[in-house]
Amino acid sequence: MATLIPAIGTCVSRMTSGERRLAQRLEQKLEADYLLWYDVPLGPANAHPDFVIVHPRRGVLILEVKDWRLDNLREVTRSDVALLTERGLKRLVNPLEQARQYAHAITSLLERDPQLTFSTGKLAGRLRFPWSYGVVLANISRRQFDEAHIGEAIEPQRAICQDEMLESADAEAFQSRLWQTFPLRFEGALSLPQIDRIRWHLYPEIRIPAADSQLFGADSETDDNLPDLLRVMDLQQEQLARSLGDGHRVIHGVAGSGKTLILTCRAQHLAQLCTKPVLILCYNRTLAGRLRQVIEAKDLADRVQVRTFHAWCRAQLLAYHVALPTARADADAWFEELVDAAIRAGERGQIPGAQYEAILIDEGTTSVPNGSN
């Protein structure tokens, strides 16, 4: 079974019926070495292709999915589509052109990395692996596609039709249909480090700065100075970070298992979606300082705030003109009074609620038997 990121159960509510069917077929009909991303913003421009598929021997494929029905299509040209909707006739970009633009943006990004391109010969500077793009017409059969002459505007080999993605479809035939979208085939296969480099370029939020193996330090790699090793979250960590969904979540793990890394990725993901700030709280001042460096390096300081819990309590009291506890020699007792003062000020309404869209807590204590947090 292929790996879909995010997990289908956490994104099914925002999928169209056609996107959901395609996601299920991709998971079921493709082998474990296929990697799939659904509606994950990629690259500096935060482009949102419906599906990105990566395979070590096949290459990279971009798919746009449309739930259009033949009865609603009034005109299809190479540049746009006239579609009859509940609000009247609308002209939309031809989805194949949309997929093509995404694909070219991706290849332009990846071609900056010499480890992903040919260094000599007539293909020098070109990617070492094939890439392509296509359209999935989830409610139009191949017969309808042909009879309506849609192939004059959407290349037939780049279109996957309703009857070619049925649950009963043979896995080999389904895969063959996917890869018919590729005009060229290259020999060889992508290595695991090369696949990680592709992920590094396409999804900046999963990068682990090379300056520190524990996540911390500025992300200093640039297109002009890419090191041999680019570190990224592993696939399990990335899938977890993107599949958390809404509501409260608690992540347990031993030291070094990547909890802080997942938290940072989650904060960046939320910052792109939220209108209010995201707050990260932690207990250790050193950890807070290092997390703050990472957030600043990702240009998120205006949307993600990083504080120790006690520093946040103190800042809230000062911001809303609530008296701080009297200084005393016993620092632990003073910190307890500080927290109590913040709680009581919140209960009285002096400190307002709903200041943040999300709150992420690193090293929150729990009652699990092994004491991990």
Image: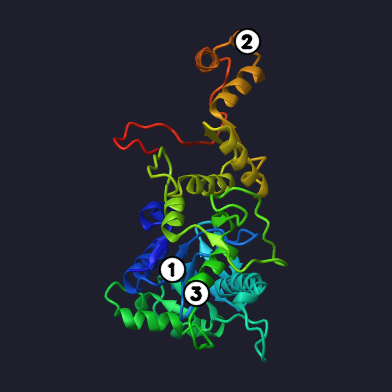
What's the amino acid at mark 3? Val
Residue toward you, 317 or 154: 317
Q: Position of residue 45 (x, y in %)?
A: 65, 60
Residue type pointed to by label 1? Leu
**Camera-side residue: 188 or 227?**
227
- Relative horizontal placement of residue 346, taking residue 305 as reference (left or right): left
- Count residues near mark 1 (Cα–Cα under 10 Å), then give few for <14, some for 14-19, many for 20+: many
Among the 4 quarters of the image, the one containing residue 210: bottom right
Relative image position of residue 236 (x, y in whole percent):
41, 57
Where residue 198 sits, quadrant-wise, is bottom right
Residue closest to the eye, 182 or 194? 194
Q: Is residue 361 above or below residue 239?
A: above
Q: Is residue 46 above or below residue 304?
A: below
SS class of the residue under badge 1? strand
Residue under circle 2? 323
- Residue located beneath label 1 in the image: 35
- Cα distance between the residues tagged 2 and 3: 62 Å
Label whose residue precedes the other's in the sequence (1 or 3): 1
Q: Which residue is mark 3?
A: 135
282 on left or right of 175 = right
Q: CA distance from mark 1 to mark 3?
A: 18 Å
Q: Which residue in the rendered view is the most extreme toward the right? A: 224
Q: Nearer the viewer, mark 2 or mark 1?
A: 2
